[in-house]
Amino acid sequence: MKKISNSLFWRLSLFFLIILLIISGVYIYTTHNSSLIYSQETSQKLNRPLAERVAKFTQPFINGSINEKEVEDLFHNVMVLNPSVEVYLLDKAGEILSYYAPFGQVKLDRIDLSPIHRFINDKEAFIKGEDPRNPGIQKIFSAASIENNEQIVGYIYIILASEEYTSVTDMLAHNYQIKLATKAVIITFLTAIIIGLIVIWFLTKNVNKISVAVNRFKQGDLKARIRLQSKGELSVLANNIDAMADTIVNNINEIRSVEKLRKELISNISHDLRTPLTSIQGYAETLVLLEEKLDKKTKIKYLNTILSSTQRVKKMVENLFEISKLEAHQVETKKETFSINELLSDMVMKFDLMAKSKSINFKINMAEDNTMVFADIALMERVFQNLLENALNHTQSGGTVLISIEKKHRSSIEITIKDTGVGISSEELPYIFDRYKKGAYGTHKGTGLGLAIVKKILELHKLDIKVESEMNVGTSFSFKLPVYS
């Protein structure tokens, strides 16, 4: 946890530091350039009339020739009075005719006149021109035309930022930038640390909560949850983790429930298989050992018992195979139209003998018309078989099992199978459709899978089944089937 906090702290602090350093650098650069442009434009505005005044008080040309002495003295005096300027005399084509500077310092022979013309014609423009001493560098200037008999014969061209002036300003600017950069770095670093600490405190507070809760959950505390009160991305993350934890806990509980059910299933199957198999083994051994001593009637009785037990084992295996296929979604419905009256009549005939043998009153109330339904007839036959077996097995002698068909709606009919048997307790009622849950039915023959199969088949048809029961009064199962139209 501490490692996470430290890692976040240094990474975010470094991030803020870099961002603020970049911002400081951009600010220093922008401020410096803005100040420089402001200073240059101000200087050009203030010194705009300078060249015009020089041109006014001098006569650089006498009879078409340059007055070298007067020009040199004037240029020298101007540069002495204002060391930040350099004065040049140009002819009307821009060629440099005269200047005051040591030999070799002036590198250009000609000046581009376009900026000079713009300067003279546009009194408000901020314009730079060529520096004769530094080719390729643009500097602020002042310029004025020299006229003779209203004809332009040349120009006074004054650079307002001389080499000496530039050298001094560059040195001062360099020192100023170092001081400004040093202050900016110190302020930026301190700001980054302070902001980093504040941000990290807010972030790691919730990150630590998330980390602690996840760690507790990992260690086995399945009730550990984050429950952040704040809003934002971390809150969304925390809610997603809590939802994931709830899903994991539900899955674990489901796995435990399935595992418990599996153990119960194996135990119950083992018990139910042991009884008929023991019976088969016992009677088979008796037949082998006492074959000569047993009469024919006794042998037939023993063989019938073996056959009955074998059929019971077969039915149990078939039920297990069927519920496995239903739960694995390997059974597909083959729906067709059929008469519900005919199907139930066949089922009554099939179970009539069983009902008579137990002295149970077995009745059916048919639909008024020959109602046609739409479903898988084979699967529906299996549903009725299991429900009727269940009803007959749990109804005592003298009781009643009633099948009724009632058309409550144009699109469906309701089928109810009701018995006057032992009933189901309210505690067991919610679990009777669970696989191998027999409850009170365990006192009767059966695999405990019949009702589970009924439930799965009806779910395949997207149908619900309702059950009502009262102890020692009876039980009724009812569901609806769609009418074919």
Image (tube, rainbow, N blue to C red):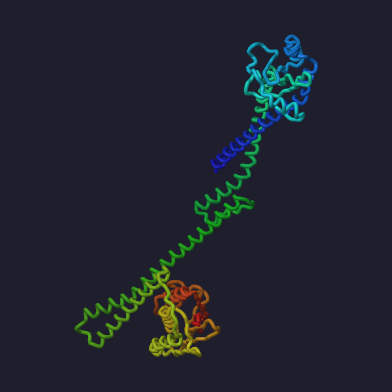
Q: Residue at x 77, y 23 (%)?
A: 47
Regarding residue 177, the answer to whether it shows in the image is yes
Left or right: 287 in relation to 481: left
x then y, percent, for residue 314:
33, 76
Quadrant location of the N terminus in the rendered image = top right
Vertical comparison of 342 with 142: above or below: below
Vertical comparison of 118 with 148: above or below: below
Farthest residue to the top: give it: 69
Total labels drawn: 0
Regarding residue 432, the answer to whether it shows in the image is no
Farthest residue to the left: give it: 292
The foreground one among 296 and 165 is 165
Q: Residue at x 57, y 37 (%)?
A: 10
Q: Quadrant of residue 343?
A: bottom left
Left or right: 236 in relation to 52: left
Left or right: 366 in relation to 74: left
x then y, percent, for residue 223:
54, 56
The foreground one among 119 and 205 is 119
Q: Quadrant of residue 271?
A: bottom left
x then y, percent, for residue 335:
44, 77
